[in-house]
Amino acid sequence: MSVLGVCALALLSQAPVKAPASAPAVPPARAVPASLTAPAHPAPGPAAPPQRENGWSALTPEQRAALIADRAESPLSERLLGMSEKFLNTPYVLSPLGEGQGVDPDPTFRLDAVDCLTFVEETLALGMAHGEPEVPALLERIRYASTPSYEDRNHLMEAQWLPNNIKKGLLVDVTRKYAKEDTVTVTKTLTAHTWQSKSSMALQLPRERQPVGTFTLDMIPLEKVLEHARGVASGTILVVMREDLPLKATRITHLGFVVQKKKRTYLRHASKGGYNRVVDEDLETFLARNARYDKWKVTGVSLFEARRPPPTLVSQPAPAPGSAAVGAP
């Protein structure tokens, strides 16, 4: 399977192949542990990730807390670059996070393993936080529509993860800002037929929680991306899109952070492929590889800027339904 094929599975937040016969319901209380030192409900099943040092592993809990609190009011883009850099060399593990129990008993937080989506989610929570105590609530807001239950998780990028985080004021679509007239409008359509496919059914979502409809996004065509890449600010989230196939529940198969350095543009991402870890990969190399995929063609990328959360988002027990407040850069 290609690197993007593997990441597509991660972006679908795939459930275990076979759920426990009598899985306990996830309680309405927050699933993310108050302490980041260890998960609240360690999962006994998944194998340990390959042992590999990253920027977090050498820190004591006190040092990690101090790092998160240090320069908390710095521009968010700088915070995201600093936090994401600590993940460099972190092993890639498919779908490493869950609810700590129930359908997906994987831990709710970890710094020793990521996939392409959880790398971005945890970096966002760490970067947005003013201190370590805020991280669990922020991660919960990013990963879930409202309540921290498996059914309420933002499983699908176009239908859930992106629109929900835009509504909460955590993301802004900046694709058109950078690509201007080269931007094209694309859609992803989900129907009842989509939910009959093997990959969609693997999510184990009840019918009433299966999104349907047409979801619209701006996209920079693959062949135009490098023309605009140098102008994209470091810390911008780049998502990779493929052609819309009726039986695929998403067309977004990968994401990471844009990093500008040494007069080159890089993608900082958790890559399965030949890397199997978080790396800074030259964007030109990354795009050239994507252009060669022919079974499920890559069509382009979209760009999103993270915003600091509105003040009420962390303090409230759950985000206000329908809130469209936009956070500060």
Image: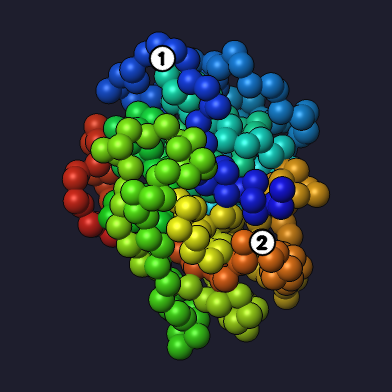
The answer to whether residue 129 is above or below residue 52 is below
Which numbered disc, 1 or 2, marks the residue closer to the eye? 2
Looking at the image, which residue is at 33% across and 17% down?
25
**N-term mark: 1 or 2:** 1
- Residue highlighted by disc 1: 23
**SS class of the residue under badge 2?**
loop
Q: Quadrant of residue 241?
A: bottom right
Q: In front here: 212 or 314?
A: 212
Judge left or right: residue 223 versus residue 179.
right
Q: Position of residue 255 (x, y in %)?
A: 57, 56
Mark 1–mark 2 Cα distance, whole angstroms, equals: 37 Å
In the rendering, which numbered label is found on residue 167?
none
Amino acid at circle 1: Ala
Please name the residue that numbered disc 2 is placed on.
295
Left or right? Give the position of 117 relative to 270. Answer: left
Looking at this view, is 120 or 77 the one in front? 120
